[in-house]
Image (cartoon, rainbow, N blue to C red):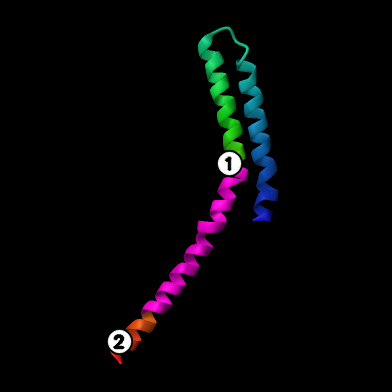
Amino acid sequence: MSDALSQMGPTVCGAAATTSAASFLLIPCELVMFHRFGVVMAVNTVVAAFMSLTLFPSLLLIMGPEALTLTLTLTLTLTLTLSSLHCS
């Protein structure tokens, strides 16, 4: 997981920084539509970057493919063991 964050973290942060910078330039606009769009886009970008670097990796560790494989392996093992006992 640390390899993924060390490789993708700077990319996500760079993308968030450039998108935020562009949206912050819209905030001082006099047209209400552009002002609101800038605020929404800036908040959305900051929240998305934060979640993608904190919450999403944590959820992947808990419910990712390896956790699913372990559960599937245990379920199949228990099922096969119980069915072999039942057939005897």
> Residue lying furthest left in this view?
87
Residue 26 horizontal/vertical position (percent): 60, 16
Answer with the quarter of the image where residue 40 lies. top right
Was residue 54 drawn as part of the magenta stretch in this picture? yes
Name the residue: 40% across, 75% down. Answer: 76
Residue 53 horizontal/vertical position (percent): 62, 44
Please give left or right for residue 12 compared with residue 37 in the image. Answer: right
Label pair 2/1, CB-CB below 8 angstroms: no
Q: Which residue is mark 1?
A: 51
Boundaries of the magenta span: 51-79
Please give left or right for residue 26 compared with residue 86 in the image. Answer: right
Helix, strand or loop status at disc 1: helix
Name the residue: 58% across, 7% down. Answer: 30
Was residue 6 drawn as part of the magenta stretch in this picture? no
Answer with the quarter of the image where residue 83 lies. bottom left
**Amino acid, disc 2:** His
Residue 22 horizontal/vertical position (percent): 63, 22
Answer with the quarter of the image where residue 42 lies. top right
Name the residue: 58% across, 28% down. Answer: 43
Counting other residues with Cα less than 10 Å from the Cα at mark 2, is it few (<14), some (14-19), or many (20 or more)? few
Q: Which residue is mark 2?
A: 86
**Amino acid, disc 1:** Met
Counting other residues with Cα less than 10 Å from the Cα at mark 1, is it few (<14), some (14-19), or many (20 or more)? few
67 or 8: nearer the viewer: 67
- 50 vs 30: above or below: below
